[in-house]
Image (cartoon, rainbow, N blue to C red):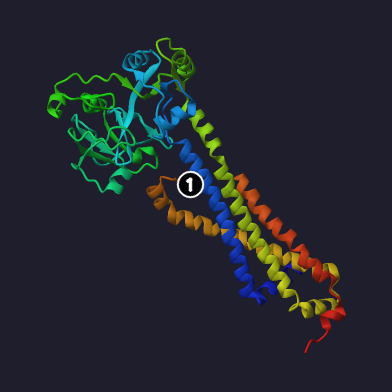
Amino acid sequence: MLLRLAVKSLLSRGLTVGLTIFAIALSVALFLGVEKIRTGAKASFADTISGTDLIMGARSGGIQLLLYSVFRVGNATNNVTWQSYQDIAARPEVDWIVPLSLGDSHRGFRVLGTTEAFFERYKYRGGRDVDFAQGAVFDDLFDAVVGADVAAELNYALNDEIVVAHGVASFTEHDDKPFRIKGILQKTGTPVDRTVFVSLQAIEAIHIDWQGGGRSQTPISAEDARKMDLTPKAVTAALIGTQSRLQIFGLQRWINDYSEEPLLAILPGVALSELWNLIGVAEAALLAVSVMVVVTALLGMVAMIFSGLNERRREMALLRAIGAKPRTILGLLMTEATLMSLLAVVLGVGLLYTGLFLARSYVDAAFGLYLEISLPTAREYLVLCAVVCAGTIVSLLPALRAYRLSLSDGMQLRL
């Protein structure tokens, strides 16, 4: 009886009720959307690198090593000698190892010296490969492969010529040894997109006539450099895969105790978690903003009920006149608010999944953020239940006011 009365009452005020439900639904969709983006961003962040058991570099902090080797942020405190790199590569626990050499840049993008194995071994987002949109891996000394963002922002195409600058923020360029773009990578949503890749030998070649941060008085041409020994003298870091996951900690301990020079080996997953915890303030801020949006929408519902009380005083008086008890009036308003909250939650969930379905491909391609379309989690179900309960609770204020309205006050005619 009370439910049917509440439904008819809501239908009689369709426009106002509909707008209120839509406002709450948008706030619910926003809240859940922020939650999906938060979990998606965290998962994408954690999957920036996968399938790599250890990252090795000169001894510093674990997060610092992760930042410059994976995210291309900052610089290494020191390099790792080529001999040390070979000693580690020769360990029986090592299945594969990929060297990384950083230090130069190209128009604001970091240049990474590595081997062809990088494009085979580097995985992201749970094991996805780095694929080529155009071209292929470098096979000439002065070939380069560029990430998707580099190609898009600088409007590069295959066979375009590029010049590498010495250092990260330097106006001195290796213009006597230009590179040719051999490949352009597909978008990954990782630092790979903003990186220029060249071979380790190319890094040696462009620095072969440099001393003390400047070009020597006897420059060496690109053709002459091809004929020289370009074995690297040092690398910045290395990605390591082990024969067995049971060997990871043993190899990590051996590298950390390496006697020839101070080295550090870190587990990428652990370092990524530590780094995420450092930037968790932004995550909490996003969550707080979305909570405030939901609270504002619920307060709007309360304001709507309050504003309609005067117009409904005659309705309440008639209900009292035909025998409705005061608690019936109280229950009616609370039932209406509960129904509105429930409808808003259902509509909000529908809006969220419609938006996810339409925008997921674009968000993945443009930002590298994978938004999974799955059933709401236990936490999200709790949030939805909390919204419905909160709608019922906040309706107590106008319901109590209606409860206290007198029969004579409601029947009084106002001319």
**Picture quadrant where residue 326 is located:** bottom right
In the rendering, at what x and y percent does residue 402 appear? Answer: 80, 71
Q: Residue at x 21, y 21 (%)?
A: 230
- Picture mark count: 1
**In this rendering, is residue 133 above or below 30?**
above
Task: Quadrant for the N terminus, please.
Answer: bottom right
Compared across the picture, whether 260 is left or right of 104 comes to right
Q: Is residue 375 visible?
A: no
Whether residue 351 is visible to the viewer of this picture, yes or no, is yes
Residue lying at the far left of the rendered structure: 223
Residue closest to the eye, 287 or 135: 287
Element on which disc 1 rests: loop
The amino acid marked with disc number 1 is: Glu
Q: Residue drawn at (35%, 13%), measured in percent from left and top?
A: 87
* Residue 116 percent across, percent down from the top left: 27, 28
Q: Which residue occupies 48% across, 46% down?
A: 372
Question: In the displayed structure, does residue 1 sit left or right of residue 350?
Answer: right
Q: Is residue 178 left or right of residue 88?
A: left
Residue of label 1: 372
Furthest-front residue in this view: 217
Place residue 235 in its image quadrant: top left
Q: Position of residue 198 (x, y in %)?
A: 26, 32
On the image, which quarter does residue 303 sit in? bottom right
In the image, is residue 184 above or below residue 100? Answer: below
- Residue at image position (34%, 35%) is 168
Residue 200 versus residue 165 in the image, above or below: above
Residue situated in front as seen by the camera: 344 or 166: 166
Q: Position of residue 323 (x, y in %)?
A: 86, 75
How many other residues sit within 10 Å of disc 1, few (<14), some (14-19) or many (≥20)? few
Indicate whether 252 appears above or below 35. Answer: above
Which part of the image, by quadrant, shows the C terminus?
Answer: bottom right
Front in this rendered view, residue 118 or 21: 118
